[in-house]
Amino acid sequence: MFEGSGVALVTPFRDGKIDEKALIALIDEQIAAGTKVLVPCGTTGESATLSHEEHDQVIDITVAAAKGRAKVLAGAGSNSTAEAIRLTQHAKKSGADGTLHICPYYNRPSQEGLYRHFEAVARATDFPLVLYNIPGRTGVNMLPKTVARLAKIDGIVGIKEASGNLGQVSDIVEQCPPDFAVLSGEDALTFPMIALGAKGAISVTANVLPKLCAEMFAAAERGDFGRARQIHYELAAMNRALFVETNPVPVKAALGLMKKISPEVRLPLAPLAKESLEELQRVLQSYRLL
C-alpha cells in the first residue's frame, strides 16, 4: 500500500500560522517529481507543536491538495493511546490513506505496552496503520519480535524503521509477512535498507531533492542496483547537511534559501546557527539549487 519514495513533509509557517499556499505548492511539486507517499504531521512536520486544530488542518489540506495523485499517510502518533485514536479517526474521515504512529515517547512503555498501544489503535479505528520506530526520539526501541506480533493484526501494514540498526531491519523483514511494508526512516540508510527488502522510504531529503529520491527507487525496482547505489552517493552530502542540527530546522532553512517557504520554526526549536547555515548554503550551491 505504501511503497516507493515518500516525503516527510515540512509544515510551512508564516508569522506563526500555517502557510497553506506554500504547503499546497510543496505538495504539487512533490507529486510532479514522482513522490508516491505524502506524510504530513510527522516529526519533520513539527507535529509536537501543532495544536489539535492545526494538526487536523494540515491533514485536510494535504488530502485535498493530493487529489488522489499520491497516497497520504497522515501522522497520528501520540504518547496517549486515546489521542492517537482520535487523530486516526480524523485522518480516516478526512480521506487519508493511512496513518503513521510513533512509539509512545516519554512514557517509555515495555514491549508489551507497545504491543497493546498499537493493538488498541488498530482495533478502535479499522484503518491502515504504519508503525514508526525511532529510539533516538522516543527513548524506547521496538524490537523485531514485537513488530512481528503486530504485523499479524489486521490493519497494521508496515513500519517506518529509524533505529539505525541494519541487523534489526533485516530481522524485521525476515520475521514479518511479505506484504508488510518496511520503510526507511533514515535517509543515509535508505539504499542499504532497499537491499535488505525495504519497500519504500519516508524521507526528509525528498523535501529538497524529490526527483533524485524517486529515481533511486525507480532504479532499484527495475533491478539497476548500480544506478541506485550511484544515487545513494549523490545524495550523501545533502543527507548529512540536512541533519547538521535537529530536524526539521536544516530542511526548513534549505527550503527557505530555495525561496519555497519561510524557514520559520516553532519554539523550542531555534533557527539554524550561522556556521550551520553557511555550510548548508554551500551544499545547496553544490547541487545547483540556489
Image (cartoon, rainbow, N blue to C red):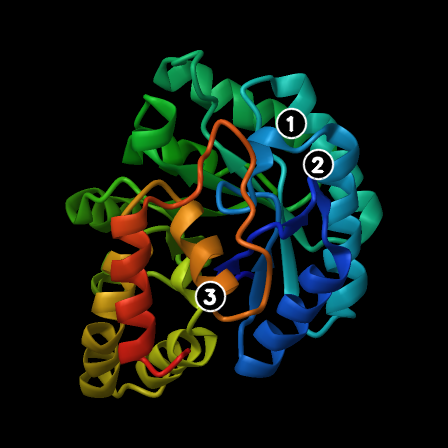
Left or right of residue 227: residue 37: right
- Of the 4 image quadrants, the one containing the N terminus is bottom right
Q: Residue at x 49, y 41 (%)?
A: 43
Q: Residue at x 19, y 78 (%)?
A: 229
Count the numbered circles shown.
3
Q: Residues within 10 Å of mark 2 (few under 14, many from 20)?
A: many
* Secondary structure state at the residue bearing disc 1: helix
Which residue has dot 3 on it?
A: 257
Q: Residue at x 40, y 55 (%)?
A: 183
User: Marks 2 and 1, Cα distance to the nearest angstrom?
Assistant: 6 Å
Q: Work out whether residue 135 or residue 152 is closer to the camera in this orientation and state it.
A: 135
Vertical position of residue 76 compared to residue 80: above or below: below
Q: Residues within 10 Å of mark 3 (few under 14, many from 20)?
A: some
Q: Work out whether residue 112 or residue 24 is closer to the camera in this orientation and state it.
A: 24
Vertical position of residue 208 compared to residue 227: above or below: above
Q: Amino acid at mark 2?
A: Thr
Q: Amino acid at mark 1?
A: Ala
Vertical position of residue 88 compared to residue 159: above or below: above
Instruction: Tell me if label 2 and label 1 are in contact, CB under 8 Å.
Output: yes
**Residue 88 shows which numbered tag?**
2
Which residue has dot 1 on it?
A: 84
Q: Residue 153: horizontal and vertical position, in percent?
A: 54, 36
